Image (spheres, rainbow, N blue to C red):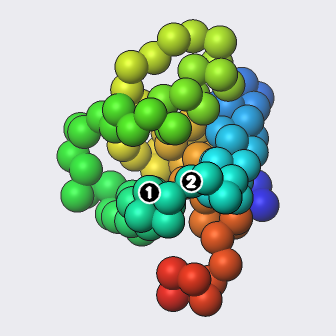
Amino acid sequence: MENYDDDWTDGQRAVYDECHQAGTEWAGDPDTPSEDVQHVINLAEADDDTFGDAESDYPPLVDAVTQATGVTVTSVPASHDDPGFRGFVDGVRVATADEVFGL
């Protein structure tokens, strides 16, 4: 499911798509602890006002953005306006059954 902002460039859409796929695969991996998946779902549900100007250094998210962009990053803006963050958390939500986490 594409959840692009209308003003995103093709590059931002590509980052979203790649991070979305990474989030889906990460959440679907049987070795991923359910507590970690719940943590990402909580990030997905949080209001951007809660984050302020926060950055996330959550390893699976950072790895997804690094792979998608080809640039080594150490943190990602914790914002639904950021294509990497939004793509990853959207991917996790898609991969997670509603009945598991009560979404």
Q: Position of residue 35 (x, y in %)?
A: 42, 64
Outermost residue on the front side: it is 31
Q: Is residue 77 visible?
A: no
Which residue position holds label 1?
Answer: 36
Badge 2 density bin: few <14, some 14–19, many ≥20, Cα 10 Å: few
Q: Position of residue 36 (x, y in %)?
A: 44, 57
Badge 1 density bin: few <14, some 14–19, many ≥20, Cα 10 Å: few
Against 63, residue 51 (above or below) is: below
Against 1, residue 100 (above or below) is: below
Q: How many marks?
A: 2
Asked whether the beta carbons under mark 2 and mark 1 sit within 8 Å of each other, the answer is: yes
User: Can you tell which quarter of the image residue 9 is in?
Assistant: top right
Q: What amino acid does circle 1 point to?
A: Asp
| Residue at 25% over, 39% down | 54
Q: Which mark is residue 32?
A: 2
Which sits in the foreground, 18 or 36?
A: 36
Locate the N terminus and report the quarter of the image it occupies: bottom right
